């Protein structure tokens, strides 16, 4: 038997352009099918596949079986219409699958189980807590060796719009991924919850993308500027942010224009269940954006991104 190559083929199969995050664990938000019926949006990032109380066993939100009908049936309904899904692990809360699966083989098996149940080929590792960079990236490399069409995105916190990704939860993980043979398809900064001196939050979100491109150039100096831009994603939090900033629809238009002009790889936002005008002027909520907007105005604006 021929041993598979130590590095996957350097060809990205990341076909998605816009895939807003959708919190699969919330019960009182519109279903994926309802959102599709009103917007035509059929590609989403599903948040989050976590570890469960039983340990190294992927669960939606750490609690719900992957085959839970309330969650999986709408996913399959959109797939029947041609929809694709990115499966997000990690996040702000946990428990991380990456913490509970303590070996390369067990974590790789967890990733493959998620992909198999959903019928997906896109993984998004949302790094908001320290992980074992070596185990995680070796597991991802193993998955890509066995399944070369599986794409890997890393979603990471931002330190500042003039700095880019944090070191420990950002660039250190990316360097480990390169070292261990992961084909990183998307580097996705969370353009939210960081300090800025810029008066316009939309300009700040765009500046974050430019700063991260500079960091990516240091990690992958062999890649052209065009190749690096195709690897860049940007994910703002629509509406009110925890840092007091407001990401308005006008900011979304500005971001989409910049993304189209620079031909970046992916746009997303947190989150589809907040994309309505139900609580203008209100506090932060998982159910509404807290800004004045029409229903699904952010989704419809982001759909203008063509890559």
Image (cartoon, helix red, strand yellow):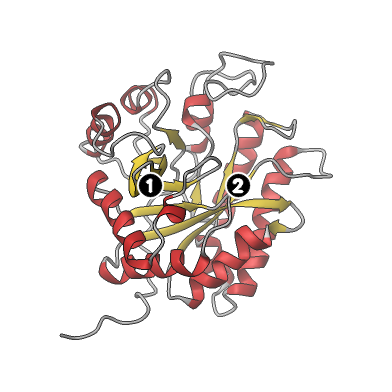
Q: Residue at x 38, y 33 (%)?
A: 41
Q: Residue at x 62, y 43 (%)?
A: 255
Q: Is residue 37 left or right of residue 169?
A: left
Q: Secondary structure at mark 2?
A: strand
- Is 149 on the left or on the right of 241, as rendered? left
Q: Residue furthest bottom?
A: 2
Residue 37 in the image, given as x and y percentages of width and height: 33, 23
Can you tell which mark lies on residue 42? none
Pick out the residue farthest to the front.
54
**Residue on which disc 2 sits:** 190
When asked about the image quadrant of residue 11, the answer is bottom left
**Horizontal side of residue 235 vs 125, given as left or right:** right
Q: Judging from the image, what secondary structure is the residue with disc 1 in?
A: strand
Q: Is residue 212 above or below residue 199?
A: below
Residue 17 location (% of width, % of height): 44, 48
Crowd class of label 2 (few under 14; some 14 to 19; many from 20; radius 10 Å): many
Q: Is residue 65 above or below residue 288?
A: below
**CB within 8 Å, label 1 to label 2:** no
For residue 111, which quarter of the picture? bottom left
Give the alpha-carbon distance from disc 1 to disc 2, as whole Å.
16 Å
Can you tell which mark lies on residue 87? 1
* Nearer to the camera, 189 or 2: 2
Quadrant of image for the N terminus = bottom left
Question: Which of 51 and 91 lies nearest the eye of the viewer?
Answer: 51
Q: Looking at the image, is 19 positioned above or below residue 295? A: below
Residue at (44, 55) in percent of width and height: 98
């Amino acid at each position: 038997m021929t041993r598979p190559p130590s590095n996957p083929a350097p060809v990205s199969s990341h076909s998605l352009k816009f895939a807003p995050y959708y919190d699969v664990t919330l019960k009182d938000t519109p279903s994926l099918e309802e959102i599709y019926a009103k917007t035509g949006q059929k590609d989403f990032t599903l948040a989050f596949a976590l570890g469960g109380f039983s340990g190294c066993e992927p669960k939606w939100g750490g609690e719900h079986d992957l085959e839970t009908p309330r969650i999986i049936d709408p996913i399959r309904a959109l797939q029947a219409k041609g929809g694709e899904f990115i499966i997000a692990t990690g996040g702000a809360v946990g428990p991380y699958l990456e913490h509970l699966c303590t070996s390369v083989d067990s974590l790789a098996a967890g990733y493959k189980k998620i992909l198999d149940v959903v019928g997906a080929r896109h993984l998004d590792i949302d790094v908001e807590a320290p992980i074992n960079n070596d185990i995680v990236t070796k597991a991802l490399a193993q998955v890509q060796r066995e399944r070369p069409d599986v794409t890997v995105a890393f979603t990471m916190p931002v330190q500042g719009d003039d700095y880019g990704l944090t070191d420990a939860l950002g660039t250190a993980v990316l360097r480990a991924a390169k070292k261990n043979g992961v084909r990183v398809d998307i580097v996705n900064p969370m353009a939210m919850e960081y300090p800025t001196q810029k008066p316009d939050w939309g300009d700040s979100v765009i500046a974050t993308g430019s700063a991260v491109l500079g960091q990516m150039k240091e990690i992958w100096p062999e890649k052209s500027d065009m190749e690096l831009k195709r690897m860049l994603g940007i994910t703002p939090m629509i509406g009110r942010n925890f840092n007091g900033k407001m990401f308005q629809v006008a900011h979304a238009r500005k971001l989409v224009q910049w993304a189209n002009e620079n031909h970046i790889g992916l746009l997303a936002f947190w989150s589809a269940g907040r994309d309505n005008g139900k609580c203008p002027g209100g506090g932060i909520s998982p159910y509404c954006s807290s800004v004045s907007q029409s229903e699904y105005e952010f989704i419809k604006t982001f759909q203008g991104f063509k890559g």
